């Protein structure tokens, strides 16, 4: 009988321990969920700041309506100019993959004074483009053969980030070399 009573006490102790673990885990996960909701809910301070900003903007607009009209008129040409530049800067990836480099035509220069010049057939005096492909993140990749060596070139359409480098996202850019660029001065921009 002593063995039976010992096992009974052991089973009772084990079931109590399981119940404690289950209740603790439920409390822990519920607490985590509440923490996540608190983090995602804006605080009163954030809401009032947003409201004050909106109010200030509205007040400024109504008190300086004459200035707003003048500013709007001045902005129209630059907005039109930006749309024109955006259209002329659009890179035609499919045409490039088919050997037509028309959307890259011109001189590209970096902050170190190095230059590449493209015509509709490819590079001018900087080697021959042997292979063109699309990169994993939207880049256009070239393998360029120059004499006995070669190098890689990547074209970054406007809006595409160059990992690890600060560059002007509003413009098309390219990088070139046997190693990845290490500074913003190595990024090429179209100059004509």
Image (tube, rainbow, N blue to C red):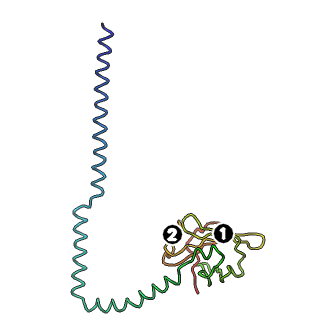
Q: On the rendered image, what quadrant is the N terminus found in?
A: top left
For the residues labelled 2 and 1, the Cα–Cα distance comes to 18 Å
Q: Residue furthest top?
A: 1
Which residue is label 2 attached to? 161
Quarter location, residue 67: bottom left
Secondary structure beneath label 1: strand
Which class describes the residues within 10 Å of circle 1: few (<14), some (14-19), or many (20+)?
some
**Disc 2 and disc 1 in contact, CB within 8 angstroms:** no
Count of picture labels: 2
Q: Does residue 73 sit above or below 4 in this rendering?
A: below
Q: Please name the residue shown 26% across and 61% down the image.
A: 42
Which badge, 2 or 1, is on the more N-terminal residue? 1
Q: Residue at x 75, y 69 (%)?
A: 149
Q: Is residue 68 left or right of residue 114?
A: left
State the image coordinates of residue 6 (x, y, percent, origin top left). Answer: 31, 13
In the rendering, which numbered label is found on residue 22? Answer: none
Apparent side of residue 25 relative to residue 93 in the rendered image (left or right)? left
How far across and how far down the image is residue 124, in percent? 70, 82
**Res. 186 in view:** no
- Point out the image quarter for the C terminus: bottom right
Residue appearing at x 58%, y 68% in the figure: 182
**Residue at the spot 25% in from the left edge and 74% down from the top edge:** 53
Residue 165 image point, x, y percent: 53, 69
Residue 181 lies in quadrant: bottom right
The image shows residue 4 at horizontal and vertical percentages of 31, 11
The residue lying furthest to the right in this view is 148
User: Residue tagged by mark 1?
Assistant: 152
As helix, strand or loop, the secondary structure at mark 2 comes to loop
For label 2, the crowd category at 10 Å Cα-Cα, with few meaning under 14, some 14 to 19 and many 20 or more, is: some
Would you identify the image quadrant in which residue 130 lies?
bottom right
């Amino acid at each position: 009988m002593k063995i039976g009573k010992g096992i009974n006490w052991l089973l009772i102790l084990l079931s109590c321990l399981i119940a404690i673990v289950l209740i603790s885990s439920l409390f822990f996960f519920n607490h985590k969920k509440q923490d996540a909701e608190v983090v995602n809910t804006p605080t009163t301070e954030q809401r009032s700041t947003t409201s004050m900003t909106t109010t200030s903007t509205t007040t400024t607009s109504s008190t300086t309506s004459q200035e707003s009209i003048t500013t709007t008129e001045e902005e129209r040409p630059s907005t039109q100019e930006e749309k024109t530049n955006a259209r002329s800067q659009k890179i035609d990836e499919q045409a490039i993959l088919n050997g037509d480099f028309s959307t890259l035509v011109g001189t590209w220069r970096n902050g170190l004074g190095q230059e590449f010049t493209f015509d509709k057939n490819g590079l001018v005096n900087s080697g021959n483009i042997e292979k063109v492909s699309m990169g994993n993140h939207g880049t256009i990749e070239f393998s360029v053969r120059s004499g006995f060596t070669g190098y890689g070139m990547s074209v970054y359409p406007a809006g595409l980030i160059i990992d690890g480098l600060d560059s002007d996202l509003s413009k098309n850019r390219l990088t070139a070399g046997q190693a990845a660029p290490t500074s913003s001065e190595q990024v090429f921009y179209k100059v004509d």
